[in-house]
Amino acid sequence: MPAISAGKVLVTGANGYVAAWVVKALLEQGFAVRGTVRSDSKANHLRSLFKSYGDKLEFAIVNDIVKEGAFDEAVKGVDAIAHTASPFHTHAEDPSELIVPAVQGTVGILSSALKHGSSVQRIVVTSSCGSILEELPVPKTFTEADWNERALREVETKGAAASAADKYCASKALAERAAWKYWNDHKGEVGWDLVVVNPSYVYGPILHEVDKPEHLNESMRMFYDAAVAGTYDKDMLNWGSSWIDVRDLGLAHALAVKTPEAGGERIIVSQSVFKLQDFVNVAHRLYPQLPAGDTDFNPATAVYFQAYDTSKVRKLFGIKLHTIEEMVKDSLEDFKARGWIQ
């Protein structure tokens, strides 16, 4: 694929936590953006936020991403697509509540691009490290070659009785596999290539519209409960995985659009391992009035189970990632500006 350094990019679910930063990064990189939202009122916050970009930002209404042909109109006249719209929550009873919209939404936009996106040159799909990692009794560094087969087996055999995490991870793995299959099946018919971005747990400041902590997206609500509200016990504070700053993830999407060598690649985007207590320690150091959490926690002896090989993203994009100190500091400053920290 030739480099796409200008033109219009469609961002699905544009008013979401990650997507808002994708929109920002694309605008800053010189692209025009068409964002999809479920209703026109949901675009008002982004219109205000990015008003300095004028007509470089526009919106299309897609009120149901599962509906056949949902993106048929939205894909017309764009040069690339960043498909971020997918459910991210862990309270579904039936796995299909997550799997159906994740798979159908992803295949749906690829199908719309095939039929109506004659100008599309690249599609970037936001997947997750949830489609890669497996819960193991020993630490492991995962790569783009790994798939979360265990979660798929758990959901297939247990159905509604599978864990919430397994349901979510299975939805991401199945949606991603469906994307790769669709692209491989239709390579001869399309003028675009495919990139899949696999972020670890996403944290960092908020751009999208949130009126109170209870309405934060799931990962940042977890951050708030641990570092500000202090509602987690020691066991939960010693839970962890790997994380990425949402600002770096937004930039990674923009670079995935414009970097020729990214075509056909699956790309892990992650900073480092963490325990929630690591976030708490930084927060308490910056704001001593915030909870100290587990004062017996020792990062030198803690076991960090899920790490990722990030050599590909560093080689392709050369992003200087935000540190844990920067992410926590900027997130807390955002909370303070909103009146959520006294």
Image: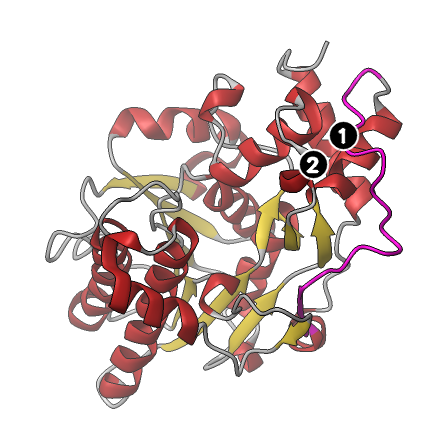
Which numbered marker is on residue 293? Answer: 1
Q: Residue at x 24, y 71 (%)?
A: 118
The amino acid sitting under disc 1 is Gly
At 68% from the left and 16% from the top, the residue drawn is 337
185 versus 171 height, above or below: below
- Image position of 255 (left or right of 6): right
Q: Is residue 120 visible?
A: no
- For the point 58% across and 32% down, which residue is it? 206
Which tag, 2 or 1, sits closer to the chain's start? 2
Instruction: Residue 305: say if magenta.
Output: yes
> Is 341 located above or below residue 113 in the figure?
above
135 or 31, nearer to the observer: 135
> In the image, what residue occupies the spot 72% across and 62% down?
319
Residue identifier under label 2: 234
The segment highlighted magenta reads 289-310
Say which quarter of the image contains residue 267: bottom right
User: Can you name the residue that lies furthest to the bottom here?
Assistant: 188
The circle on residue 191 is none
Q: Is residue 74 magenta?
A: no
Foreground residue, 106 or 111?
Answer: 106
The image shows residue 157 at horizontal and vertical percentages of 26, 68
> Residue 280's spot in the image, x, y percent?
76, 34
Type of amino acid under label 2? Lys
Residue 327 located left or right of residue 92: right
Q: Nearer the viewer, residue 294 or 335?
A: 294
Badge 1 local density, few (<14 within 10 Å), some, or many (20+)?
many
Marks 2 and 1, how far apart in space?
7 Å
